[in-house]
Amino acid sequence: MTQIREAWGSKLGFILAAAGSAVGLGNIWKFPYIAGENGGAAFIFIYLICIVIIGFPVLISEILIGRTTQRNPVGAFSMLSNSKGWISVGFLGVLAGFLILSFYSVIGGWTLGYVVETLRGSLSNFKSPEEAGVLFGRLSGNALWTLGYHTLFFFLTMFIVIRGVQGGIERSSKVMMPVLLSILVILMIRGVTLDGASEGLAFLWVPDWSKINGQAILIALGHAFFTLSLGMGAMMTYGSYMSKKDNVVSAAGQIVFLDTVIALMAGVAIFTAVFASGLNPAAGPGLIFQTLPAVFAGMTGGVYFAFLFFLLLAIAALTSAISLLEVVVAYFVDERGWNRKGAVMIFGGTIFLLGVPSALSFNLMSDVTFMGKTFFDVVDFIASNILLPFGGLMIAIFAGWVWSRSAVMEAVKEGAENFFEMNPNFETIWFIFLKFIAPVLIAIVLLNSLGIV
Ligand code: PHE
């Protein structure tokens, strides 16, 4: 291991790459529709609490484990604990990377497909979400269409990761993240200036507590993990390329801030437009691919906004996908001595193939179900509802109970001496969340996913 390991060129580069990982389909596709289904403002309030009391403390820990060991999740746990149990937590992270990327790329492909469809003009004549739904059904029901765009999306992901941490991931994030933010600002301004936008804003800001039940809280908590890319080592791997001169706490704070603000901006852009068109905010997963195309079709200049919107989604998905692939690649590079190019080609190729049955779950294989779930749904469920919360639970327990507190503090203070002097209570609060609050709440989510509570 005498070879110099790759690293970010700057703290800003790290923040943009990590925010790129966090901001994804989770923020722009999933967050608006789960908020819509669960009553809007009250749900968002609970989600924000989950982000602060669980997401933020676990994110600091994950980045810190990576930065301290300068390794992928498997190598990181074996360096810090050397017990088989903890090393297998690292392995589960790599496995989650395989699984999530395989189906994520299918949806990522749809977003690219929709960019092309807007350019071809097929999205401009809808009079209702039902009509948009027919097109969506036709496209996703076409095996060649889904496979083709899955392939294209995967190709782009591999193309970036093959170029390395600085030359590929950091460089592309520095371009894509500002573009993403600019598009979102444009769409938000368009949204709030529509007639009837205020109803959409009220839906987002005026809480209706009657909609909140245990299930909604669990969804909010589970989503806090997914949206911050926690629990599978993506942030650990990105943290492993971070300099010890930089402050982990402030970096984590900036990532959380960007992820949250972008989800809320997406909510504003989408709900103002949906309400202004008099459509239903609780449309579920079809909100983006069925309701929104109908909204855009009814707007002056709607084609341009539709184009920008799907481009936004595609960029968000791509910057997340590269972080998923990087976890897998980092493992084979650090632990197995592969070179980056070989690891990207071979394991990227494997993940791509694993994605094929997910892509076919909407067409040729839609009848192949396991306990009522398609292949796509099974992989999504195992990864997002079991592996991520389990990984998050283990990371909180590891940082809170297993790794000695003095070692944690020594590691976190590197690059953050002033921060801890100026915020003397931060340590105590962080540890209370890590040791008690996060593990208990995550354990409840996990048991619920497994159908136990
Ligand atoms: N955070 C990403 C999103 O919101 C998804 C993701 C999960 C990415 C886990 C990497 C690791 O879409």
Image (tube, helix red, strand yellow):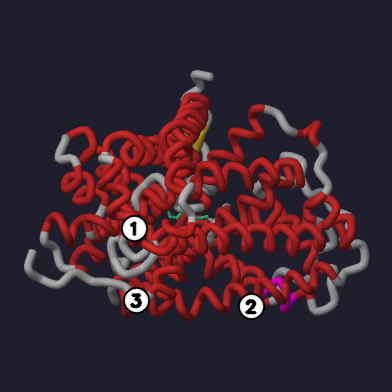
Q: Is residue 336 left or right of residue 320?
A: left
Residue at image point 50% right, 40% down: 377
Q: Is mark 1 within 8 Å of ligand 1?
A: no
Q: Is residue 161 left or right of residue 420?
A: left
Helix or strand or loop: what does disc 2 sit on?
A: helix
- Pick the quarter of the image with the N terminus: bottom left
Main SS class of the magenta portion in the image: helix
Q: Is residue 137 left or right of residue 96?
A: right
Residue 305 painted magenta: yes
Q: CA distance from mark 3 to mark 2?
A: 22 Å
Q: Which three-letter amino acid code belongs to the residue tagged 2?
A: Ser
Helix or strand or loop: what does disc 1 sit on?
A: helix
Classify 10 Å Cα crowding around label 2: few (below 14), some (14-19), many (20 and above): few
Residue at image point 53% right, 57% down: 256
CB of mark 1 within 8 Å of CB of mark 3?
Answer: no
Residue 68 painted magenta: no
Question: Which label sits in the foreground, 2 or 1?
Answer: 1
Give the magenta range: 303-308
Q: Which mark is residue 168?
A: 3
Identify residue for label 2.
182
Q: Residue furthest left?
A: 2
